[in-house]
Amino acid sequence: MLDVQPDDVVVDATVGGAGHAKALVKGLGGNGLFVGFDADSDAIERAQKALENSRATVRLNSANFRDLERELRKQGIPKITKALFDLGWSTYQLDSGRGFSFMADEPLLMTYEKHADKETLTVAEIVNTWSDKSLADVIFGFGEERYARRIAKAIVARRGKTPFETSRDLAETIRRAVPASYRRGRIHPATRTFQALRIAVNDELDALKEGLSAAWKLLAPGGRIAVISFHSIEDRIVKQMFVEWEKQGEGKRITRKPVGPTAEEVAKNPRARSAKLRVIEKVVRRT
């Protein structure tokens, strides 16, 4: 739905495993430009190898997409024609050893940056120091977890005995805090809480608003932005921004309703079942 043309200037705001990047670059010709972003430096290294034989010019940036405008202007790129935001996280992050997996004994970081400094907020700091009210607010607000209060109280009670150090330890405390019937659900009972903590640590929702706004500002008339979201909070933000741009006469939504994955796509990648795609095109203003 991005309709990539040979001479486009394409931004992939979340390079990740470079799957989308390879498909986007394939549509570009010798005069095309691909600019990729990822906060994870490991993802940038993988993308460099995956895209090394591309016909188009490829520029990769180890940066969060909230800094998209600054990085593009620094490189002398005043306009873009296509942009993709895939808000899902890759299996590489799950195996990064930074606490994204609740099935392993990993340090409680959940930072996208590989090398976090002492000033960086981590999950360990949140679960070991925040009040039960603050924890419940984050878990409910960012994870839409119905048992947020129970989980928050369980976290505070457990850390009173010994601080949390690993993701598996935290996940087990969460599992014990919820009703037995909830433990037998389709997803692990810690899934929503881990989502909420990841969003809080990486300030993902504000980053999304800033990154989308920057891409829209630099988008040329006739250009398109596509966003793939994986939970209702992200999708709500994307929808609201797209609707507002359309109301202002600046954009036209290509997808009036979000597009979900096909059965074949879900069979290949079960995690894609919750994916929602929205696309908007910038309107060519008539004078």
Image (cartoon, grey):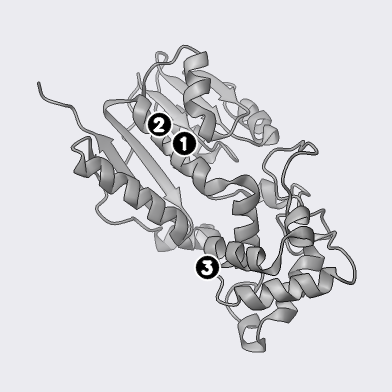
The percent position of residue 133, horizontal first and vertical second, equals 64, 68
* Residue beneath disc 1: 211
Give, as a three-letter code, the residue at label 3.
Answer: Glu
Which image quadrant for residue 106? Answer: bottom right
**Secondary element type, mark 2:** helix
Mark in the foreground, 3 or 2: 3
Whether residue 172 is visible: no
Mark closer to the chain start, 3 or 1: 3
Give, as a three-letter code, the residue at label 2.
Answer: Ala
**Secondary element type, mark 3:** loop
Q: Which quadrant does the C terminus fall into? A: top left
* Residue beneath disc 2: 215
Q: Residue at x 50, y 35 (%)?
A: 13
Eyeballing the image, is 127 above or below 55?
below
Q: Are marks 3 and 1 in contact (CB under 8 Å)?
A: no
The percent position of residue 154, horizontal first and vertical second, equals 74, 76
Q: Residue at x 69, y 52 (%)?
A: 94
The single residue placed furthest to the right in the displayed view is 162
**Secondary element type, mark 1:** helix
The single residue placed furthest to the left in the displayed view is 287
The percent position of residue 109, horizontal first and vertical second, equals 75, 50
Q: Are marks 1 and 2 in contact (CB under 8 Å)?
A: yes
Q: Report the front residue among 36 and 213.
A: 213
267 left or right, relative to 182: left
Q: Residue at x 59, y 49 (%)?
A: 89
Eyeballing the image, is 150 above or below 39?
below
Which image quadrant for residue 143? Answer: bottom right
